[in-house]
Amino acid sequence: MNTATLDLTQQLMRLRSITPDDAGCQDLVARRLEPLGFAVERIRGGEVSNLWARRGQSKPLVCFAGHTDVVPAGPLDQWLSDPFAPSVREGKLYGRGAADMKSSIAAFVCAAEEFVAAHPRHGGSVALLLTSDEEGVAVDGTVRVVEKLKARGELLDYCIVGEPTAVRTLGDTVKNGRRGSLSGMLTVKGIQGHIAYPHLLKNPAHLFAPALAELAATEWDRGNEFFPPTSWQVSNIHGGTGAANVTPNALEVQFNFRYSTASTVEDLKHRLLGVLEKHGLAYDLGWVHGAVPFLTSNGALIVAVRDAVQAVTGIVPELSTSGGTSDGRFLIDICPQVLELGPVNASIHKLNEHIEIDALDALKTIYRQVLERLLLPA
């Protein structure tokens, strides 16, 4: 089976757009959109390529957002085929970016082509926002486009991010929000010494152990209707000189909160500091607030997506806020309704990443129907 969506997905996958290199993906998309009447704007951020394409000037503005960059392939000898030479086997398309998320981008474009061909005088506006800095540090990508659009008052009404959201089959899960991310780098101070003379030293690993146990056992909140309880996790602990008979002078602890709308950053910081003070620790602590939580409640976008998914797949999608962060955390600044909808995520970032061939046109049709439900008269 050869369709326009499959063909464009394969074209995009052949371009080795390892983050933050776009490798020509956005030029390929621009060449497809410009003949449809999209005004294409390239917004550079450092070494990062970003694209903003819009058709129409009226409201409402419906935007599809995504990223052209992919993660590295990993060990090439463990792929069954070249990750940048898309291969079709047993009803699946294999290669880096198959699910995350060049298939979604292809479905965006093909949905727009079909929609414009059928409704050249449609109401409202259609837009695509693409970046090549989502899989990396994400400082010069979507956030830069959002800053520019906000500065000139160009706000979105509805936005669908094409992240792979499905768990078992296309359409079973739609993300209507994401948790916030708050990270810390804690340095617990001690006194280095010979392990045979414990009265002459202060071992920061021992000093921190009771606080670690308390922090790990703390219930930060109970979540709410859409979010699970806030989670606190240690990602790295480092200390010591490498010698077996010397205690460390300091212990470095990296940790992260994945927090819900049931907590605030200020409260989480205050409670953690209270535990450190309670245990009498000498420490330095730096914070990085990586993402705010966001939630899209029931509204026109949820209704349109739910109805389109059900019409195409027969499935009523489940709303979820699970998983890591996405560029939705930036888009919510200029758009009141943001959802994520894309293919099955089971193989993303893995060796032999793949997507079901049948899902490609189904995803395109869902996106097209969303446009029809939001931009055409009832």
Image (cartoon, rainbow, N blue to C red):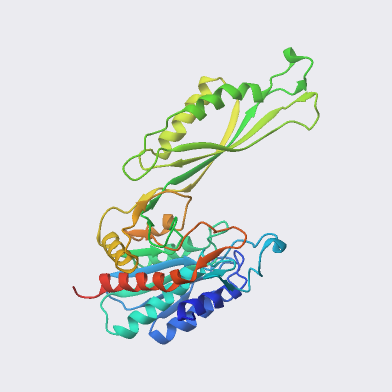
- Residue 244, above or below 77: above
Quadrant of residue 87 in the image? bottom right
In this rendered view, identify the residue nearer to me: 214 or 111: 111
In this rendered view, identify the residue nearer to me: 187 or 230: 230
In the displayed image of the protein, which residue is found farthest to the top? Answer: 199
Marks counted in the figure total 0
The residue under the point 46% across, 83% down is 32
Quadrant of residue 229 in the image? top left
Q: Residue 188: x, y in percent?
A: 62, 28
In the displayed image of the protein, which residue is found farthest to the bottom? Answer: 35
The residue under the point 79% across, 32% down is 242
In the displayed image of the protein, which residue is found farthest to the left? Answer: 378
Q: Residue 220: x, y in percent?
A: 42, 32
The residue under the point 67% across, 59% down is 74
Q: Is residue 281 visible?
A: no
Q: Is residue 332 left or right of residue 95?
A: left
Q: Residue 41: x, y in percent?
A: 46, 76
Image quarter where the C terminus lies is: bottom left
- Residue 29, above or below 284: below
The residue under the point 57% across, 56% down is 137
Q: Is residue 275 left or right of residue 264?
A: right
Q: In this view, does 337 lie to the left or right of 147?
A: left
Q: Is residue 16 visible?
A: yes
Q: Residue 161: x, y in percent?
A: 41, 63
